[in-house]
Image (cartoon, rainbow, N blue to C red):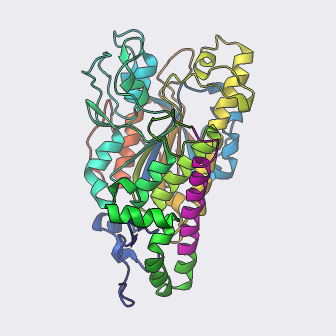
């Protein structure tokens, strides 16, 4: 039972049969509900996400015309115009350990394996894979205990742990961005239903036979199983918190309905007879991406985790984009040979990915938290481990940083650096997350100018 006189704990959840629905931050929780480290940094928890796109980008349409705050967003970045003041464009950052270093081919595998680890991966297509601990997992080791999920790994293409994918490099390198240990990649989840179940503890295979029978009889929304807790909580909240709770539960239900719709329709991938059920994976790439980004935003809103990664595709992906009038494979196009027709198609793919980033930022900005929005509390890195897909270079990478990091980042600028390690940015982000680390990969210190 909820105590009318007590403040809510930040860890309060609504419980039901096999369900634990975490709550967004409410005024009734107060700063006192936060853990000491969060209170010391100004109250609300900070979160960070890393979004990855493969095959580089068309840099002439990516790089702003000038440094500072007086810049224009180029063609590829134009969908981010509504978020211009919530954004940093970071030029001149590099991941030098993705370079061959005598290993010759395999730039795609190295670019992804190095992107968050900062480490040069061992060239092997056997079981003896070795990269490094990725920056998201460095954070998860230290602060993952503060949330129900220490980290969340999401994507569109499944992860592989074996096989040869790129010039003698294991497929593990080109399909996993997150590494728990130097030989242990963290497979990403690509099924929206499984992510939803993981966030809200509603997986039927974890229930007792009696609980499974009860859920089967009812076959209703996850919200139905927490209805009594929700009703009691609602009666004890103020007007603002009631509205926020209603909006949050509405968002949960909306995502659940979309997943259920695809599971029941011909738009959802169907297994062969006798094969395992794939769940709610839409055939429509656009809907698949947006469902996953909605779930990422919801996970941050509920403080189910503060650390996430998302891959739009595995590295060297040769996916075609027919809905963009691009029937050619992305990887094939990235080897453009300066062909203007290929440039045009690459631009369309790059812009589509940026539109999805804009969608996520819009979701985060729509979620109220404290005196601001969730976008004020997050740091979202978007980028690729390759700059130009034809050159396979790992310097002057396309990197964006969105969100204000709890007010510690002065956004709305294009910052130009001179061949500094991307890992310097990651160390600066760890500082803002309350995570201690002296170095990462080839870091040379913290990245300057972020706070102005």
In this view, the residue in front, 134 or 246, is 246
Percent from the top left, x then y, of residue 321? 67, 29
Residue at image position (58%, 67%) is 250
Above or below for 315 versus 125:
below
In this view, the residue in front, 219 or 287, is 219
Judge whether residue 369 can be spotted in this image.
yes
Residue at image position (32%, 27%) is 119
Above or below for 338 versus 326:
above
> In which quadrant of the rendered image does the N terminus lie?
bottom left
In this picture, residue 391 sits left or right of residue 151: right
Above or below for 309 versus 362:
above
Q: Main secondary structure of the magenta part?
A: helix
Judge whether residue 45 can be spotted in this image.
no
In this picture, residue 346 sits left or right of residue 96: right
Q: Quadrant of residue 304?
A: bottom left
Q: Quadrant of residue 281?
A: top right
In this picture, residue 322 sits left or right of residue 263: right
Query: Is 446 part of what is drawn in magenta?
Result: no
Percent from the top left, x then y, of residue 108? 46, 20
Percent from the top left, x then y, of residue 322? 71, 28
Above or below for 252 versus 229:
above
Residue at image position (37%, 73%) is 12
In this picture, residue 282 sits left or right of residue 429: right
Q: Which residues are magenta?
A: 244-269
Query: Is 252 part of what is drawn in magenta?
Result: yes
Percent from the top left, x then y, of residue 405? 46, 55
Image label count: 0
Residue at image position (37%, 91%) is 5
Q: Quadrant of residue 169?
A: top left
């Amino acid at each position: 039972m909820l105590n009318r006189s007590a403040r809510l704990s930040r860890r309060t959840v609504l419980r039901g049969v096999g369900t634990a629905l975490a709550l967004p931050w409410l005024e009734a929780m107060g700063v006192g509900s936060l853990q000491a480290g969060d209170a010391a940094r100004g109250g609300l928890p900070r979160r960070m996400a890393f979004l990855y796109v493969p095959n580089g980008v068309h840099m002439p349409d990516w790089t702003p015309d000038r440094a500072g705050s007086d810049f224009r967003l180029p063609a590829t970045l134009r969908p981010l115009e509504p978020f211009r003041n919530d954004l940093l464009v970071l030029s001149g950052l590099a991941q030098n350990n993705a370079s061959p270093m005598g290993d010759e081919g395999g730039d795609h595998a190295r670019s992804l394996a190095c992107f968050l680890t900062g480490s040069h991966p061992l060239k092997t297509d056997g079981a003896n894979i070795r990269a490094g601990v990725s920056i998201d997992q460095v954070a998860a080791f230290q602060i993952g205990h503060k949330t129900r999920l220490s980290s969340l790994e999401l994507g569109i293409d499944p992860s592989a742990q074996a096989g040869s994918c790129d010039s003698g490099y294991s497929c593990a390198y080109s399909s996993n961005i997150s590494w728990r240990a130097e030989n242990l990649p963290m497979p990403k989840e690509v099924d929206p239903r499984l992510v939803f179940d993981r966030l809200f503890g509603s997986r039927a295979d974890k229930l007792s036979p009696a609980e499974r029978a009860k859920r089967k009889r009812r076959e209703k929304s996850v919200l139905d199983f927490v209805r009594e807790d929700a009703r009691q909580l609602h009666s004890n909240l103020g007007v603002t918190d009631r509205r926020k709770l209603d909006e949050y539960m509405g968002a949960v239900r909306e995502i659940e309905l979309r997943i259920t719709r695809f599971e029941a329709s011909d738009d959802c991938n169907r297994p062969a007879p006798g094969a395992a059920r794939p769940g709610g994976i839409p055939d429509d790439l656009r809907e698949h991406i947006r469902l996953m980004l909605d779930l990422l935003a919801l996970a941050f809103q509920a403080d189910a985790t503060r650390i996430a990664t998302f891959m739009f595709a595995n590295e060297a992906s040769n996916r075609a984009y027919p809905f963009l009038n691009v029937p050619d494979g992305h990887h094939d196009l990235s080897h453009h040979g300066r062909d203007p027709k290929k440039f045009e198609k690459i631009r369309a793919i790059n812009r589509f990915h940026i539109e999805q980033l804009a969608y996520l930022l819009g979701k985060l900005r729509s979620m109220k938290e404290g005196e601001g929005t969730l976008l004020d509390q997050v740091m979202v890195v978007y980028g690729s481990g390759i700059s130009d897909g034809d050159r396979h270079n790992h310097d002057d990478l396309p990197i964006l940083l969105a969100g204000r990091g709890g007010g510690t980042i002065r956004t709305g600028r294009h910052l130009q650096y001179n061949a500094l390690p991307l890992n310097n940015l990651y160390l600066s982000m760890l500082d803002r997350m309350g995570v201690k680390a002296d170095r990462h990969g080839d870091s040379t210190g913290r990245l300057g100018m972020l706070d102005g």
